[in-house]
Amino acid sequence: MIVSALCVLGLAQVQPNLQAGRFELSERLKRLDVAWMATKDPARRREALTPINTAVAGFFRGRNSEVAEALDVAAATLEGRRVRPSDALNIRPQRPISEPGATLALKITWAYRPGSILPIRVGVGNQEVEVRPGSEATLNMNPWLVNPELRQNQEVGFLMPVRVGMDTRYVYVSFVRRLDERLQRLAGSSNPLVTDIAGAVRGFQANPATMETELPLVQWIYQAESIEEGKAKASDIDQVHYARQGSTVFRAAFPKNRQDGPVNVVIAVHGAGGSENMFFESYGRGAAVSEALKRGWAFVAPRAGASAIDDSLEWLTTVRGMKLGKVFLMGHSMGGGVVVSASPKVRPTGYAVFAPAAARLGPVASELPVFLAVGKQEQMAMMASAIAKANEGRAGFVFREYDPCEHLMIVADAVGDAFRFFDGL
């Protein structure tokens, strides 16, 4: 463990409101994703569908605390255990990047009210505190006082283990020297990719609750500096953590062995309330990205928007300098609706959509191969059923129903079949 002990400098507790925002829901969704993939027992999966459907319904009603609790119940069900009061706790750093040697502050809050009035012990290294239901805590610590590994490599991003009750969770933290000075220099770059990365990092520092990616931000800064100093080019980077083209923000991954000729690409659009990080870190813990890269294909996940597909393709050709091979479009829920309704400037080769928020295919998609996947326990199955009925028997159209499965887990279950469908096009 990189953090063996910590020096606790202070603890303050006040009465808070329940807190379940993007960060808190993102962390729980990732835990559910892992539990779902690790569970092969159909009966246990089927039992978890009820709380998962409750979470989906709660999300669309804006009841985030209800969503957080339902996600915890679903994960516990898949893991074959009861929900623990400690599951209701949120743990995150108050600032995702700090100066080497600086004190860190962990913010401890509650996503919902636990089914217990007993305090929960939260510990890091050999230090721990008690947090009572209905209170929040700020735990200040300085790992540099006692950890020689951090002194040897002071600029680092790592997973800090945190004991929460009987469980161990991990908090992503980064340490960077002269952070403000370096961000200011990057923000003044003439390269849009560099300035966009600097702006995103500044935004996360100002409002850490909006940061839902697990990528250590030190990597973002190093990438921006490498581009600014001419050590790397947009055309050479295997992992683009954050970029912008037109009105679209996106994240992208490219095969390590570059090809001189055309490269196939998958453009994948997330569902409502998600972001460009979902296909990389959720939806089967990045299964779609892995499937694309092992085929030597590029993968781009844009933030959903009217011009998301065209902006992504334009960046690939103009900034990346990539020659496009086959273009595959993929989308989940709202993103599925965006994909099948679009009329992109580059004609796609085929589509894969998971529980799309659309009752019909657009004029382009209706003429091309489409893979449509839906869970048998899907609460919004009427739309997918309408598409399936209208395209029944059409050459190149494949409809598959997964059981047991519903709206949230359909990508994880069906993405492998979607790529095998792409292989045949």
Image (cartoon, grey):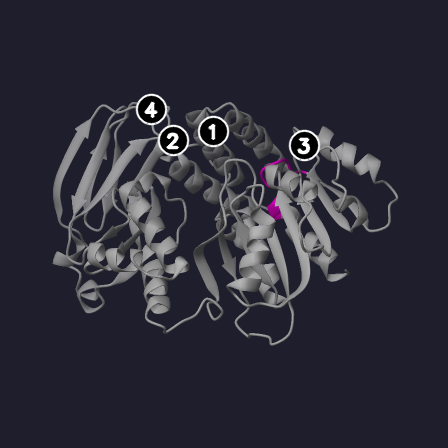
> In the displayed structure, does residue 44 sit left or right of residue 121?
right
Inspect the magenta stretch and tell me whether residue 38 lies in it. Answer: no
Secondary element at tag 2:
loop
Please name the amino acid that badge 2 sits on.
Ala
Residue 40 visible, this angle: no
Please name the amino acid that badge 4 sits on.
Ser
220 versus 296 height, above or below:
above
Residue with the mark numbered 4: 116
Q: Which mark is residue 20?
A: 2
Q: Which mark is residue 67?
A: 1
Considering only order in the chain, which callout, 2 or 3, is on the residue closer to the N terminus?
2
Marks 2 and 4 close (CB-CB < 8 Å): no
Secondary element at tag 1:
helix
Alpha carbon of mark 3 to alpha carbon of mark 2: how far? Answer: 26 Å
Considering only order in the chain, which callout, 3 or 4, is on the residue closer to the N terminus?
4
Residue with the mark numbered 3: 377
* Residue 45: quarter of image: top right
Observer-nearest of 173 and 249? 249
Magenta region: 404-412
Alpha carbon of mark 2 to alpha carbon of mark 1: how far? Answer: 8 Å
